[in-house]
Image (cartoon, rainbow, N blue to C red):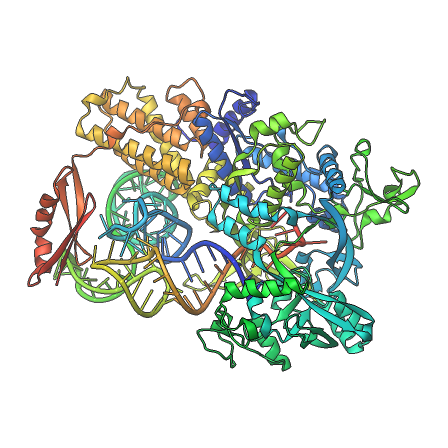
RNA sequence: GCCUCGGUGGCGGAAUUGGUAGACGCGGCGGAUUCAAAAUCCGCUUCUGGUGACAGAGUGGGAGUUCGAUUCUCCCCCGGGGCACCA
């Protein structure tokens, strides 16, 4: 072992040895305990950012720790390779998305390898490869035939200038991000997954996931949003529009039905369109509602507006005429796209009724009384006894629910129903760089799925999109085809799939990544699945994780996997945040500048005053702290840090900075300290090894000093084992090793036994650090005299007897305030402890003139004397 | 707007889940070593008052429960994430 710690050399050597011995390649070995450790695969955006380093180091620490527990650990890596950034890069640089993506993958693969991750690279794949997405298309055709996938209209953001559909991210303040044009809502046909058919199961099986954070399960439950309520029909007979019918609404408060004073429908509701046929003003209002983006955040924060129609519906119980309004706050996507409005007991309806002068009729006795004068009070929404409701007066919520449900059922005007907030998953995208939807539109046969023997539908790879419309729709050589059932000329679907589809099943593909007879090899898939530990950003808590759970169930129902859930344990990593900086051009478009290119001015207290771009010295706007992302250009490239300090230092620094589930504002202050710590470990080990390795440790003949050192070693084992193995708190595990090092550096090294105790300490430091800083651990382990590599060494065992102490220090409090410390024998009785506390000098001083009322003794911890 | 998580020294964070607030590290200050510097080592470092022993205050703000609250309860403020086409 060299005297100087030189990360570059030892990291290179360790990585070469792992590669030479294929150290992380795994196979299905039936007699071994398996552990599938999976980190969310990256989008190949160009370079790694700190969030990636954090994510993959966490995964690697867990994988290596599990290997030291003796398990057969699978840790794969791949690329979520389809997506919008490739199209944007293509437009900016005139490179085809495929070429851009593949070169990013090559660069980022090298970056990942330089981090020394224990990955089985033989299983690597990219989702943009036809032998991957072929099976996605295969599953699509199966599901389409089963009716799990269907076609209907959906609403998208339309940029009238660029003549293209925009993603929500591309709509900023209601305008297209490139054109600056006001965005409109537009209805187009799309394919949908019937995820709502699985809503009940997706909800209930959350209870079978004790290894998931409560926070994520809560968010998913709320997202699925099961509510029990009533479907209520309001009949209408409208000579003016020549149609009869029933307006269906869903309500969770049928007990307030007698207080309904109007109904409101979404602007997209068919009844709104009917009413507008003879009403130009209403027509104009509906047009106005089309302005702006489709995202819920936009819709929910816009001003609540409504417009009366000339239509009326009948109250299902009283027959009273209720006016029909069109309101922009009613969402077409939830329930029936129509609501019954009870202004007296719903805050939003109350505001709307007040604004438009609609009647407010209280029908519930609440804690605020029998009436509902303005302003709104939260108590108005309470459940209570019914009033002003004829035959239902005096009933409480539950009996009113039942009674009103029965009457509605008799009249065939409604019945109890469960409603989910969850909507079916629309997956059609009018984009190029995605998996083609395997459907052929035939004038006589309709939508025909592409037969298995014609899969995959290969995406042409040399296209450079221009940002106007869908490129595939302009390529006859792609879309012209013949119908598989009737052989007549037909047109291939030119939409591609949402990229969430690829990331919904990749975890299963890793079990048999090169299998060419099916989506997965069921034997391999069932060997590895479910994933034992899944690690990824909290930002995926809902969408990705819900879709992956849904897909796993779809695959189960196709007989491809046996398990019900894909991820047994989930660790949601907090995001790495960084400041954002931008400038706005004359069109209103924003250009984002990387924090590395910006100079920040602060006052004497460190408060940020202004920021300017280094290259031109001119000011930039400060956009706040956000997650590192391509779109805000605030990702910090870890490469410079890896080059300067090495992978171990980066890994150590990143793991020491904070616990994995906490969000982290990026700052590199402290990297030096991580490096300094590794140098100290190296130096002590080097000195120890140079002195010659000691003989065996004899724990029966240790002196007090040696016992203290050995106690420190086993305290570190206890702390690190809990922190890494159970709580995934790597920062405190590292702190424990640092504390141990502080002891070892001062430990005596004179006798053979001194040095045997130190040997145990240094071996412990090496083993505890092995998952976190694997390269230095690899070298130290050899130096400490071991032939087998540290990756296969067992995790150190705690010797409880090393922790035993003869005496303890207790805290003495008077009235809860710290007043002193006493040293007592470990086996002292409660009486002895109390007596020692009472006679403490400081206690006497602070209780002087007071009467002692109570003495609380917490064994091994403290004594609190209550006096007044 | 809705759902969810968080807020502790100058900074990152710790606190065995109701029992010594600030572990461990960064930064800062002082010292040793050195011709000098780097590196390394030692000491101090929450705030206020005091030369000091020490005392008081203190975990976003306000109230409460308790012998004792960073931890539990209620109200409020601020920040992060998600909101179905960023991934």
Image quadrant occupied by the N terminus of chain A: top left
Q: Quadrant of residue A460?
A: top right
In the drawing, does residue A323 fall left or right of residue A382?
A: right
Q: Quadrant of residue A417?
A: bottom right
Q: Is residue A305 above or below residue A60?
A: below
Q: Is residue A59 above or below residue A384?
A: above
Name the residue: 90% across, 45% down: A444
Rendering coords of residue A294 (x, y %)? 68, 61
Rendering coords of residue A148 (x, y %)? 71, 44
In the drawing, does residue A498 fall left or right of residue A381?
A: right
Name the residue: 57% across, 57% down: A227
In the drawing, does residue A615 fall left or right of residue A152?
A: left
Q: Is residue A550 above or below residue A788?
A: below
In the picture as drawn, the residue positioned furthest to the right comes out as A488
Q: Nearer the viewer, residue A221 or B40?
A: A221
Q: Is residue A469 visible?
A: yes
Image quadrant occupied by the C terminus of chain A: bottom left
In the drawing, does residue A68 fall left or right of residue A83?
A: left
Rendering coords of residue A739 (x, y %)? 31, 38
Q: Is residue B60 above or below residue A237?
A: above
Q: Nearer the viewer, residue A573 or A302?
A: A302
């Amino acid at each position: 072992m060299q005297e100087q710690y030189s990360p570059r050399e030892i990291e290179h050597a360790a990585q070469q040895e792992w590669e030479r011995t294929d150290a992380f390649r795994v196979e299905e070995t039936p007699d071994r305990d398996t552990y599938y450790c999976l980190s969310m695969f990256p989008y190949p955006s160009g370079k790694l950012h700190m969030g990636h380093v954090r994510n993959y180091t966490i995964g690697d620490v867990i994988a290596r720790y599990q290997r030291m527990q003796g398990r057969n650990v699978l840790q794969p890596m791949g690329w979520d390779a389809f997506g919008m950034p490739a199209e944007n890069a293509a437009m900016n640089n005139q490179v085809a998305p495929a070429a851009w993506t593949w070169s990013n993958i090559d660069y980022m693969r090298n970056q990942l390898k330089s981090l020394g991750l224990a990955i089985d690279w033989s299983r690597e794949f990219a989702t943009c490869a036809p032998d991957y997405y072929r099976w996605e298309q295969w599953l699509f055709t199966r599901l389409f035939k089963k009716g799990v996938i269907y076609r209907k209209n959906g609403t998208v953001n339309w940029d009238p200038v660029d003549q293209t559909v925009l993603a929500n991210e591309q709509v900023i303040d209601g305008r297209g991000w490139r054109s600056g044009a006001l965005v409109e809502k537009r209805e187009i046909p799309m394919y949908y997954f019937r995820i709502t058919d699985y809503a009940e199961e997706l909800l209930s099986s959350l209870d079978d996931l004790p290894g998931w954070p409560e926070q994520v399960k809560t968010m998913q439950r709320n997202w699925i949003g099961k509510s029990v309520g009533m479907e209520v029909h309001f009949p209408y007979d409208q000579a003016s529009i020549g149609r009869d019918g029933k307006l269906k609404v869903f309500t969770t408060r049928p007990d307030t039905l007698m207080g309904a004073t109007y109904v409101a429908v979404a602007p997209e509701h068919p009844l709104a369109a009917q009413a507008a046929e003879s009403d130009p003003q209403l027509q104009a209002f509906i047009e106005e509602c089309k302005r702006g983006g489709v995202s819920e955040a936009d819709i929910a924060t816009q001003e609540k507006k409504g417009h009366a129609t000339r239509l009326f519906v009948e109250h299902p119980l009283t027959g009273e005429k209720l006016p029909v309004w069109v309101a922009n706050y009613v969402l077409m996507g939830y329930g029936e796209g129509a609501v019954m409005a009870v202004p007296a007991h719903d805050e939003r309806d109350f505001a709307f009724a007040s604004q438009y002068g609609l009647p407010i009729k209280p029908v519930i006795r609440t804690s605020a009384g029998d009436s509902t004068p303005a302003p709104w009070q939260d108590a108005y929404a309470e459940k209570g006894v019914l009033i002003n409701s004829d035959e239902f007066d005096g009933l409480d919520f539950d009996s009113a629910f039942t009674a009103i449900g029965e009457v509605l059922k008799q009249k065939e005007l409604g019945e109890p129903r469960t409603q989910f907030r969850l909507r079916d998953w629309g997956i059609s995208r009018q984009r190029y760089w995605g998996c083609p939807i395997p459907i052929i539109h035939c004038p006589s046969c309709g939508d025909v799925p592409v037969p298995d023997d014609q899969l995959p539908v290969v995406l042409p790879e040399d296209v450079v999109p221009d940002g106007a419309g869908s490129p595939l729709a302009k390529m006859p050589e792609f879309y012209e085809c013949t119908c598989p059932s009737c052989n007549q000329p037909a047109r291939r679907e030119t939409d591609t799939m949402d990229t969430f589809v690829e990331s919904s099943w990749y975890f299963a593909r890793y079990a048999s990544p090169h299998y060419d007879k099916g989506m997965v090899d069921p034997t391999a898939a069932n060997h590895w699945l479910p994933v034992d530990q899944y690690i990824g950003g909290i930002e995926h808590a809902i969408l990705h994780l819900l879709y992956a759970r849904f897909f796993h169930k779809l695959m189960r129902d196709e007989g491809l996997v046996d398990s019900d859930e894909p991820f047994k344990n989930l660790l949601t990593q907090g995001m790495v945040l960084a400041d954002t900086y931008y400038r706005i051009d004359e069109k209103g478009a924003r250009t984002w500048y990387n924090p590395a290119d910006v100079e920040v001015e602060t006052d004497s207290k460190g408060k940020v005053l202004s920021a300017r771009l280094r290259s031109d010295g001119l000011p930039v706007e400060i956009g706040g702290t956000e997650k590192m992302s391509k779109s805000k250009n605030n990702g910090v490239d870890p490469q410079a840090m890896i080059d300067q300090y090495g992978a171990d230092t980066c890994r150590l620094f990143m793991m020491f900075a904070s616990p994995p589930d906490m969000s982290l504002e990026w700052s590199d202050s402290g990297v030096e300290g991580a490096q300094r710590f590794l140098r100290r470990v190296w130096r002590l080990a080097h000195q120890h090894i140079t002195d010659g390795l000691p003989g065996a440790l004899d724990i029966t003949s240790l002196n007090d000093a040696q016992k203290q050192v050995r106690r420190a070693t086993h305290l570190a084992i206890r702390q690190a084992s809990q922190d890494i193995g159970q709580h995934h708190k790597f920062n405190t595990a590292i702190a424990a090793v640092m504390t141990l090092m502080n002891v070892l550096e001062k430990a005596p090294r004179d006798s053979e036994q001194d040095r045997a105790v130190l040997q145990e300490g240094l071996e412990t430091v090496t083993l505890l650090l092995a998952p976190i800083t694997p390269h230095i651990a690899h070298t130290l382990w050899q130096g400490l005299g071991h032939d087998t590599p540290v990756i296969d060494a067992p995790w150190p065992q705690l010797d409880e007897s090393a922790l035993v102490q003869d005496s303890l220090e207790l805290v003495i409090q008077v009235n809860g305030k710290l007043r002193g410390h006493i040293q007592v024998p470990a086996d002292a009785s409660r009486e002895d402890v109390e007596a020692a506390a009472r006679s403490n000098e400081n206690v006497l001083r602070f209780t002087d003139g007071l009467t002692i009322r109570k003495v609380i003794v917490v064994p091994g911890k403290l004594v609190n004397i209550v006096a007044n």
